Amino acid sequence: MTKSKTFTLYLVKENVVAFEDALSSTAIDRIKAGSATVRNSERLGDRSTAFIFEGTPHPPSWLADLAAVFGNLPNIKNATSCSIVAFKNKQRIFLISFGHGWQHIDESKIEPDFGLKVAINSPTDTKIKRVDRSNLGEAIKGVSQSAFQRDLQAFGLDEALDQVRRITARSDDEFASNLAGSTSLKITREMVLSDIVSISEEALLRFHSGRYKNTIFHIIDKVRPILDRQILKELDETAVKLIKDGENNFELSMPGWSDEDVVYYGFSGLRLQKRFPDLLMENYRAALGRDIVNLEPESIVSKHGVFAEFANDSMAKKRWSIKKALIGSVILDGGLYAISEGEWYRFDTQFKDDVEASFKELIDGWDNPPLKIIRKVSDDGKRIGFESEFDYNKRSASYYGQICLDQEILEVPAIPFGKFEACDLLDVEKKKFIHVKKSSRQSSILSHFFKQGSNSSKILKTFREARLALVDKVRSLAGNHIGDELARKLGNSLEDWTVEFHIIDAARSDGTYTVPFFSRISLRDEARMLKGMALGVVVRFIPT
């Protein structure tokens, strides 16, 4: 009886013709030095080769800990060996790793989404067991899993923003009993090694299949993470060239590590010691000065960095590389690529155009110049910062005759979690819920900002108890007269009310205002939900 086994299969890129070319430089050096065993065979595909790497015997790391307490221990030595089997079938090269053999594979020579494509083209919608994903809008990684097989919709995949990295599932036929797909394809079924030839043929067909386009996994064509090292190298080189040439493809942003107010920004790895209120590409170029001609990919990856100082004295400085701070996009070989928090992604052009059009529809100007945020300068003149959002909101409320609800938490037992913040500024007369954020460069924080604003409005629209709590809060802050007027204008449906997102920021180099692309996706989705509740949605920029 054939036993159930698990093999891990890789597909090598079409332009690789020799088995050795798919191996890492370390593996090739060991082969040349004669410290690896190489065996050829005609019994696996058109031809095949096994590369076996023997480990050097050494005591296990835990043995020294035991020896400090126990005496007369055996002289144990472990030797971890591994192997890579390469074979050719249907004009393509496949690799199978045994043990830690995957460490001897050159990642730039294999198809980065082979396993994922095979996996999503294999199961039915009711046989997915686990989905590993990363959310671009909120900059988090997550896993959805179930002890039983679930419908795809049960995993709650957000359109485009949730990037599928790996799925685990059952196949819908005899192809496999279980499979897991990412870069590699891990397949489990009753088989012997020679069966991998027919399995590779079917896997290749599924890799090229478009079946997934009719499932929830069609989202991978809209935004796809780039894993190919050669393309990543070309993208980094292109980005550096555009920065050196003074083009406006890129700006700098703070990764979403904290909601705390940033007081100052500065650069590390450079001679310039100044602090800035905004994190701007023009400041980075100015800091480079004449040395900008020597800028190279290694500079933005590991040599040059950005740091932030916070209003909260208990918080330490946060530091990150220039590459991790880059936001923007480039065209490379006809494809559109964008970078967020150091990771590159490829976009479907039509999807990008739809997001851009939706964003432009939400932007509105000002009838009169908006109230500016106050700039503060340190005594030595080196540090320039802005007042906090809370202080700005208090001044705005006084200036415009609005009510400042920033940090005013409403307690409503009837709603999930029991507490929420209605908005930052409430304009009773003009029927506006206004949410304010300082800086439009932080992708994850902006996405959270838009979602928080839409959730607050949804609560007010849905729960009468929430509206009553808001009215009570306004009565305590502004008096019964204003509270009564608010109750009348809220009514039972928030008719004619508008949700406004005000973003305080400097203009880009071309004079326009925008937010990172991933935040525009979040804004589009939240705006759709708000408009579906018959609420208006507007985005306004307050220039610094």
Image (cartoon, rainbow, N blue to C red):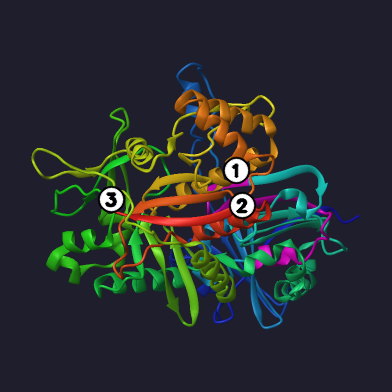
Residue 10 visible in the picture: no
Q: Do residues under tags 2 and 1 come within 8 Å of each other at their CB atoms?
A: yes
Q: Nearer the viewer, mark 2 or mark 1?
A: 2
Q: Nearer the viewer, residue 58 or 237?
A: 237
Q: Which mark is residue 432?
A: none
Report which residue position mark 2 lands on: 535
Q: Nearer the viewer, residue 541 or 244?
A: 541
Give how far across and how far down residue 265 sits, in percent. Answer: 25, 47
Report which residue position mark 3 lands on: 306
Q: Which residues are magenta?
A: 114-142
Whichever of callouts 2 and 3 sits on the residue coming sooner in the sequence is: 3
Question: Above or below — where is 300 with respect to 400?
Answer: below
Give how far across and how far down residue 49 sits, in percent. Answer: 63, 71
Whichever of callouts 2 and 1 sits on the residue coming sooner in the sequence is: 1
What distance separates the C-alpha of mark 2 from that of mark 1?
A: 9 Å
- Local SS, label 1: helix
Q: Nearer the viewer, residue 316 or 359?
A: 359
Q: Residue type at mark 2?
A: Leu
Give me the residue at 79% from left, 64% from top. Answer: 122
Q: Which mark is residue 457?
A: 1
Q: Residue furthest front?
A: 481
Give me the residue at 65% from left, 68% from top. Answer: 114
